[in-house]
Image (cartoon, helix red, strand yellow):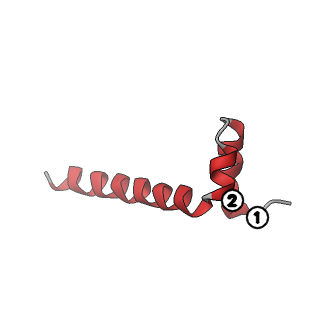
Amino acid sequence: MEHPILFLVQLFDLIGLGHFAHHYAHVVYSWFVMLVLVGIAYLGTRRIG
């Protein structure tokens, strides 16, 4: 059973970027967190304006 937090590595395997994701999983998850934070900021500022 794969650790649930590593779902992005398996997703990258499906699209052909598994070699990158296995070596640099921390980069993949850092970018994922940044995208989530940008999305939250966008939703938050949309309600202010």
12 lies above or below 32:
above
Q: Is residue 16 left or right of residue 43?
A: right
Regarding residue 22, the answer to whether it shows in the image is: yes
Q: Which amino acid lies under the numbered mark 1 shown in the image of this protein?
A: His
Contact between marks 2 and 1 (CB within 8 A): the answer is: yes
Position of residue 6 in the picture relative to residue 41 (left or right): right
Amino acid type, callout 2: Leu
The circle on residue 23 is none
Q: Residue furthest right?
A: 1
Q: Residue furthest left?
A: 49
The residue tagged 1 is 3
The residue depicted at 54 percent of the width and 60 percent of the height is 29
Q: Residue at x 71, y 37 (%)?
A: 14
Number of numbered discs on residues: 2
> Which residue position holds label 2?
6
Q: Is residue 9 left or right of residue 27?
A: right
**Quadrant placement of the N terminus:** bottom right
Q: In the image, what residue occupies the spot 30% across and 52% down?
A: 43
> How many residues crowd mark 1 within 10 Å: few (<14), some (14–19), many (20+)?
few
Rendering coords of residue 24 (x, y %): 60, 58
Q: Quadrant of residue 38?
A: bottom left
Taking 12 as reference, is 43 left or right? left
Considering only vertical position in the picture, is 37 above or below 13? below
Q: Secondary structure at mark 2?
A: helix
Q: Position of residue 30 (x, y in %)?
A: 49, 62
For label 2, count other residues whose C-alpha is less than 10 Å away and answer few (under 14), some (14-19) or many (20+): some
Spatial separation of the CA atoms under disc 2 and disc 1:
6 Å
Of 40 and 5, the residue lying toward us: 5
Visible residue check, residue 8:
no
Percent from the top left, x then y, of residue 3? 76, 64
The kind of secondary structure element at disc 1 is: loop
